[in-house]
Image (cartoon, rainbow, N blue to C red):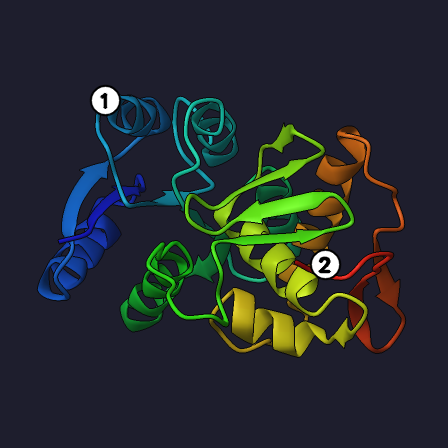
Amino acid sequence: MNSILLVDDDMDLCNLLEEYLSEEGFKVTTANDGAAGLAQARENQFDAIVLDVMLPIHSGFEVLNKVRDFSNVPILMLTAKGDSIDRIVGLDMGADDYLPKPCNPRELVARINAVLRRLDKKREGPQNPDFLQVNGITLNRGNRSCSFQGKALNITGAEFSILDQLMSKAGNILSKEVLTERALSRKLTPYDRSIDVHVSNIRKKLSSIGVDKDQIINVRGAGYMFTVTEPAE
């Protein structure tokens, strides 16, 4: 049974989502302010966290930032409907996905399941070897880690999945539609900038450990491409 931490100060919504998630087979722990949510995240092991942006004591962004200091647990942010700034900021700070409020419980379950599928470590078969290396960047699919010339990269689950897709198709353009479906396990929706923000974060992190800034390029109107100077292994 997957365990979920739900952090939201709306008691009625919390009760509704807790009941729905429990019926869908999740073990749910709730917290109604940022401090309580952060304490739960520190003291317990969760498979995913659903985190509201607007919280008392510590905002969702503050909780996200502090959790990322000690954990890469998948985090799905609940943002105000239509507030693209909150979504971009959350993704930029390391959130794996977001959902606008008021949210449909069925869609929340679908998003949580999509995030958990991305973390499935049991990839088998010759088409999914444990390691992938291109241009000195190494992906370890067993523990979902990334390094460049021996230097480790701090990467979120969503970022790993996107980088995996790009490196697997190095030298080829992948559209945002394809990346969203394959890496985020959902359809691309209008005005959805999740892929753009995640790729931007990946570029920054790669650059910080010495990777060329043009390793991943944006092909206008087409998508993104991982440039290659040596064949994938």
Q: Which residue is mark 2?
A: 196
| Residue 128 position in % (x across, y down) | 48, 66
Q: Nearer the viewer, residue 133 or 207?
A: 133
Q: Is residue 194 left or right of residue 13?
A: right
Q: How far across and down, in percent of the image, does residue 147 sit?
A: 63, 37
Q: Residues within 10 Å of mark 1 (few under 14, many from 20)?
A: few
Q: Are marks 2 and 1 in contact (CB under 8 Å)?
A: no
Residue 93 in view here: yes
Identify the disc placed on residue 182: none
User: In the shown orientation, is residue 70 left or right of residue 187?
Assistant: left
Locate residue 91 relative to residue 129 in the image: left or right. Answer: right
Mark sitting earlier along the chain (2/1): 1
Residue in view at x 32 percent, y 64 percent? 113
Q: Is residue 125 above or below residue 9?
A: below
Judging by the rendered image, the residue that carries numbered circle 1 is 43
| Disc 2 residue crowd, few under 14, some 14–19, many 20+, Cα 10 Å | some
Q: Quadrant of the C terminus?
A: bottom right
Q: SS of the residue at dot 1?
A: helix
Q: Which structural element holds mark 2?
A: helix
At horizontal 24% and vertical 33% (from top left) the residue drawn is 45
